[in-house]
Image (cartoon, rainbow, N blue to C red):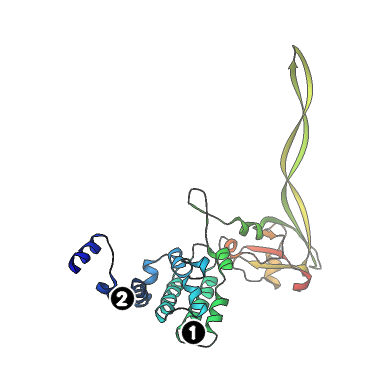
């Protein structure tokens, strides 16, 4: 009879604890702990997130929640550490790799503290787990068809510098004039012949036209910061030589540092001019 029950269980795909040496959760924990060095080769970032943070979250039964609350077994603590170690070895699809290393290092160190039984380690893990901030920095945005879409917030927060022409540097080197260009719109009215009820008449029809025109930007030298294509500040004789009238530079109207995503597209001898807030001086 017992043999028949075993055959039925196998036929139904049921894994009996007595035949496998422990429950599935414990085996998973041991397997992840044993393979923690290779975890990043077999699990994606999304899969790690699900294993560490998702199952049972609404009932506060997710793996990280049990660890923080002090309800996790030793195997579960080691399993969470293995997942975070794998996470630290992965590379995010979005965001800075340096930021990713900093965030994941904090998770690994906190989880190591929990495994070692260090005081306040669970609180440190809770602090290191900032899901919203992490998602905003590193989680890709997907389109309706499942393709990865760039985050437009980056482009809105850090608009690219624009080409400008050095018009003039004052003799006392206190003022700089740049020529930039901009698109301006003009409303014009066109004469259009229309026909109605067999009669023709001329009507004025509005039409919006766009054209590019040059504009001047006057800057005080002590209110600007000038960097090269590698982000290094340019000053002294080298600055004045490169700010000669007629030279092409890049101008960023805001006082924010030039984003590295733009700098990596520039030649090392490019010149980028940004403004300085009074409090930055």
**Which residue is tagged 1?**
113
Question: Could you say which disc has been placed on residue 22 in the image?
Answer: 2
Foreground pick, 42 / 132: 132
- State the residue lying farthest toward the front: 1
Q: Is residue 264 above or below residue 213?
A: below
Foreground pick, 79 / 102: 79
The reply, left or right, for residue 5 in relation to residue 26 is: left
Q: Quadrant of residue 123?
A: bottom right
Residue 105 coordinates in the image, percent (x, y): 50, 77
Q: Nearer the viewer, mark 2 or mark 1?
A: 2
Q: Is residue 12 above or below residue 203?
A: below
**Neighbour tally class for label 2: few under 14, some 14-19, many 20 plus, Cα within 10 Å:** few
How many angstroms separate mark 2 from mark 1 (CA)?
A: 27 Å
On-image quarter of the N terminus: bottom left
Residue 231 coordinates in the image, percent (x, y): 62, 69
Foreground pick, 208 / 270: 208
């Amino acid at each position: 009879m017992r043999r028949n029950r075993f055959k039925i269980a196998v036929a139904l795909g049921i894994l009996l604890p007595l035949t496998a040496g422990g429950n599935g959760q414990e085996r998973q924990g041991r397997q992840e702990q044993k393979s923690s060095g290779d975890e990043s080769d077999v699990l994606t970032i999304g899969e790690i997130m699900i294993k560490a943070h998702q199952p049972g979250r609404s009932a506060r039964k997710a793996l990280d929640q049990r660890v923080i609350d002090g309800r996790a077994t030793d195997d579960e603590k080691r399993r969470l550490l293995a997942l975070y170690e794998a996470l630290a070895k992965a590379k995010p699809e979005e965001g800075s790799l340096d930021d990713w290393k900093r965030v994941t290092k904090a998770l690994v160190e906190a989880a190591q503290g929990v495994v070692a039984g260090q005081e306040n380690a669970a609180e440190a893990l809770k602090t290191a787990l900032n899901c919203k901030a992490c998602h905003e920095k590193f989680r890709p945005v997907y389109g309706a068809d499942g393709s990865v879409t760039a985050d437009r917030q980056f482009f809105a927060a850090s608009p690219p510098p624009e080409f400008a022409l050095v018009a003039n540097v004052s003799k006392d080197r206190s003022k700089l004039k740049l020529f930039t260009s901009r698109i301006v719109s003009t409303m014009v009215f066109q004469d259009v012949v229309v026909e109605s009820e067999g009669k023709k008449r001329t009507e004025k029809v509005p039409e919006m036209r766009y054209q590019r025109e040059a504009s001047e930007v006057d800057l005080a030298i002590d209110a600007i910061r000038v960097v090269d294509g590698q982000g290094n500040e340019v000053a002294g004789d080298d600055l004045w030589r490169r700010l000669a009238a007629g030279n092409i530079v890049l101008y960023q109207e805001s006082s924010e540092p030039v984003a590295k995503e733009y700098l990596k597209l520039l030649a090392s001898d490019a010149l980028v001019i940004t403004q300085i807030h009074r409090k930055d001086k």
